[in-house]
Image (cartoon, coloured by chain):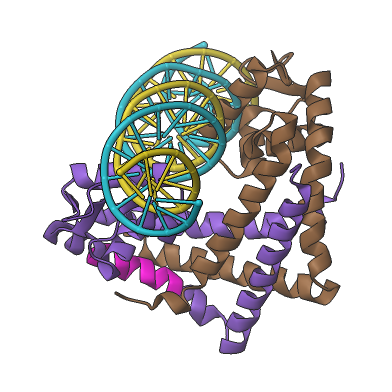
Chain colours: A purple, B brown, C cyan, D yellow
DNA sequence: TGACAAACATCAAAGCTTTGATGATGATCG
DNA sequence: CGATCATCATCAAAGCTTTGATGTTTGTCA
C-alpha cells in the first residue's frame, strides 16, 4: 500500500478529533443534546433569526444535514422557526428559553474540555498547532483540487 | 458562553479533520468505496482473517458500526466472511480479489492526499504536530475522565 | 462438572451526513 | 417586462455511528 501507517498524519488528526468528539458527546449528553445540536444552538445564541442555510454554513455541514438537526431541535422545543417577514422563502430560527437553558448547561461542560486542551499547551504551542493545522488544511485542499477530474 | 470561539482549538482540529474527510471521500469515491470502507479494507489487507471485533478496534469504531461496514462490503463482494475453524463464534474476514483491486485503486489516490500533507511540512514540523496532537488527546481524555459522574 | 466472566456477533432505535433532485422565491440584467 | 441565476427549503436514498440489549461460544475456576 502506498504510504506506511506510521507516516500518515491523517491518522493522528483523526484520532484526536475522535477523542474530542467522544469527550464532547459525554460532556453535552447530560443536557440532552448531541454535539451537532450543541454546535447549532451555540451559533444560534450569537445569531438570532439566522436562516437554516446560513446555519449550515456556520457549522460546516450541508443544508440537508442541518435540516435534520433543526428538525430534532424543533421537535424538542429548543428552537423555533418562523417565516421571514418579507422574505418569503426563508425560515428564521431562534432559541427558545428551554434551548438557551440546555445550551448553557452543555456549554459549561463542553468549555471545560476545550479549556483542558488549551491549558495543556502554552500560548506559543497553541499558535503553532493552529498554524500547522492550517497549513495541512490548505495542502489537503490543494491536493483534492488537483485530483479532481474536471 | 464559556469560551470564545477564537480560542477553541477544537474548532481548528475539527475543521482540518473535515477537510481531510472530504478530500479522502473524493479520492476514494472513484473506487466505489467510502472512507470507512477504505479504512476497513486497508486494515484487512495487512491482517487477513481478522475478526469483526478486532477490525472495529483497529478502526476505532464500535463493533456495531463495523458490522454495518462489513455488511456493505460483503454485499458488494469485496470481502468474504467465514466461520473460524475451531473457534465457533468468530467470523474470519478476508479480502476478495475485487476487494484488493478496489483497495489498490483507492489507496493510490488516498495516499496522494496524505503525501501532500506530509510534503507541506518538514520532518521536524511533522513530529511537532504529532506531539501536540498527542498531548491534546491526553488532555481531552483526562478532562473527560474528570467530568465523569462516577 | 457447573457457574461465571470474557469475547464475539447481531438486532434495534436514534441521529448525523452526503449526494442528488425538486420546487419556491427574490434579485439581476438584457 | 421577462429570462436567468442565486438562495433557500425539503424529499429521498444510502451509509456511518452510537447506545442499549441479546444470545452464543470459550475458557476459567471453584
- Which residue is located at x 84 percent, y 72 percent? B123
The span shown in magenta is A104-114
Closer to the camera in the image, D14 or A15? D14
* Image point (50%, 67%), residue name: B10
Q: Main secondary structure of the magenta part?
A: helix
Q: Is residue B150 visible?
A: no
Whether residue A106 sits left or right of residue B15 in the image: it is left
Is residue A40 visible to us here?
yes
Check if residue B66 falls in the magenta segment. Answer: no
- Residue D11, quarter of the rendered image: top left
The one of A142 and B2 positioned closer to us in this rendering: A142
Q: Position of residue B121 (x, y in %)?
A: 79, 71
Residue B104, position in %: x, y? 84, 34
**Hey, which quadrant is residue A50 in on the image?**
bottom left
Seen in the image, is B93 located left or right of residue D3?
Answer: right
Where does the image place residue D4, in percent across and percent down from the top left?
A: 49, 43
Q: Up-down: is D16 above or below B130?
A: above
What residue is at 19 percent from the left and 59 percent from the top? Answer: A95
Amino acid at each position: 500500500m502506498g504510504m506506511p501507517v506510521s507516516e500518515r498524519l491523517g491518522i493522528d488528526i483523526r484520532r484526536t478529533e475522535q477523542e474530542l468528539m467522544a469527550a464532547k458527546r459525554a460532556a453535552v449528553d447530560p443536557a440532552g443534546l448531541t454535539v451537532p445540536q450543541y454546535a447549532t444552538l451555540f451559533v444560534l445564541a450569537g445569531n438570532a433569526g439566522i436562516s437554516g442555510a446560513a446555519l449550515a454554513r456556520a457549522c460546516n455541514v450541508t443544508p440537508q444535514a442541518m435540516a435534520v438537526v433543526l428538525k430534532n431541535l424543533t421537535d424538542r422545543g429548543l428552537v423555533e422557526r418562523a417565516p421571514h417577514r418579507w422574505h418569503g422563502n426563508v425560515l428564521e430560527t431562534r432559541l427558545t428559553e428551554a434551548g438557551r437553558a440546555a445550551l448553557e448547561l452543555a456549554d459549561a461542560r463542553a468549555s471545560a474540555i476545550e479549556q483542558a486542551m488549551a491549558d495543556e499547551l502554552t500560548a506559543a504551542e497553541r499558535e503553532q498547532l493552529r498554524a500547522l493545522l492550517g497549513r495541512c488544511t490548505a495542502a489537503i485542499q490543494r491536493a483534492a483540487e488537483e485530483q479532481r477530474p474536471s
